[in-house]
Image: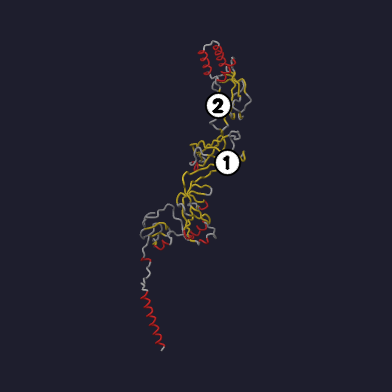
Amino acid sequence: MNNRIVALLVLLGLGAGYGLAQLHPQTSVAPASKDDKQALYWYDPMYPQQKFDKPGKSPFMDMQLVPRYAEAEGAAATMPAVQIDPRQTQNIGVRLASVTRGVMTSTLDLSGILAFNEREVAVVQARAAGFVERVYARAPGDVLKAGAPLADLLIPEWAAAQEEFLALRHSGDSGLIAAARQRLRLSGMPTGLIQQMERSGRVQSVLTVTSPLSGALQTLEVREGMTLAAGQTLARINGLDQVWLQIAVPEAQGATLAVGQTVQSRFVGLPGKRVSGTVSAILPATAMDSRTVQVRVELPNPDGTLRPGMTAQVRLAQTSGQAVLQVPSEALIRTGKRVLVMLAEEGGHYRPVEVEAGAENRDQTVIRSGLQEGQQVVASGQFLLDSEASLRGITAPPSGMPEMGMQPGAQP
């Protein structure tokens, strides 16, 4: 009896299965192996960014190339990377920063020394032979005002010419008077002395030499009783209305400077005072010992508080003039041979990328190659991620390596 019941149940089960199969027909297909799938490309695990069109031996390492299949490509696994749960990034201190594009403006802090403005120089000379009758109380280093007397000179040649002029003036012949006046000018007599002689009607044989401009007396080469020759230098005076600030700029930064740009300077002897000036010249020669470029800055000095020889702290602003890629300087990993960043990708993936770093301005560094605008890099915690990548054998490929078109066996 029991055997009949079991047999009946088996028959009922077979019938039910057949009925379901008729209602929902299915085709059973055996799962395909990887060997039956079409590989997208082959790659060397040590250089995953390099793709090959066919299998073979890697030109980089002594190993066979590995195929890359469609599902692996769709899983964003073209590059080996460190994966961290996005919820854990805050716990380990990972902070991201974007790769931005903008004009690089950097500042350069240097020291400078004030010097005289060599364009504002007056050289006082004897216009004719004579004698020094008096020297005023002057000494090199004195600050003089324009018109300050330096010395009294007796010039006998001028006395004779003036007597001749005064005698001709009584003749009433305008032509002879004009010719006599012209001879006085050609002998070197100043116009003011001629006018004084004409007004007084007396010979003016003594000339008082004065400072032609306001400034510092550099040299005074006259003494009372000296005999002077025509053209002999008596004094040299440097103006102080403008002074030069001499700056030695490192050769690498000198190329970005331009004549006319503004310079901010502060002086140790003038606390709290800032003076703005402009770059007037960039000297063509480079100092061989220090590899620096000499830059000349003109500073206004209306009140005379800036004295040649003073030291200054100078800030130069430099602008690249074109938009460049920038990342925070703290995101860079400098190994001594290469500069790396940890590139953040979707899904909490991080991988090292080699970059070529350029100029640095405080907290920003120019990136010449290796990154694209809009990408994100790790600005904090990158050393921890780099160590994890090194433990897993994930290394940054060399910068500038081509990604497509290399065949197995070709030279990299």
Q: Nearer the viewer, residue 395 or 83?
A: 83
In contact (CB < 8 Å): disc 2 and disc 1:
no
Q: The N terminus is located in which quarter?
A: bottom left
Instruction: Determine the residue located farthest toward the right in the rendered image.
Output: 137
The residue to which callout 2 is attached is 123
**Residue 406, located in which quarter of the rendered image?**
bottom left
- Residue closer to the observer: 342 or 292: 342
Q: What is the three-letter code of the residue carrying label 2?
A: Val
Where is residue 311 shown, x and y percent of the image? 59, 38
Disc 2 to disc 1, how far (Cα)?
32 Å
Q: Identity of the amino acid at label 1? A: Gln
Q: State the quadrant of the C terminus.
A: bottom left
Residue nearest the viewer, comparing 382 with 232: 382
Q: Examine the rendered structure and indicate whether residue 94 appears above or below residue 262.
A: below
**Of helix, strand and loop, which one carries label 1?**
strand
Q: Is residue 43 left or right of residue 191?
A: left
| Label 2 CA crowd tier, 10 Å (few <14, some 14–19, many 20+) | some
Give the farthest residue toward the top.
Answer: 171
Nearer to the camera, 195 or 238: 195
Answer yes or no: is residue 380 visible.
Answer: yes
Residue identifier under label 1: 313
Q: Position of residue 313 (x, y in %)?
A: 57, 41
Label 1 Cα neighbours within 10 Å, binned few <14 / some 14-19 / many ≥20: some
Q: At 56% from the left edge and 16% from the top edge, which residue is drawn?
A: 158
Quarter of the image where one finds residue 60:
bottom left
The answer to whether residue 158 is left or right of residue 38 is: right
Query: Could you say whether the residue bearing mark 2 is in a helix, strand or loop?
Result: strand
Q: Earlier in the sequence, mark 2 or mark 1?
A: 2
Q: Is residue 333 visible?
A: no
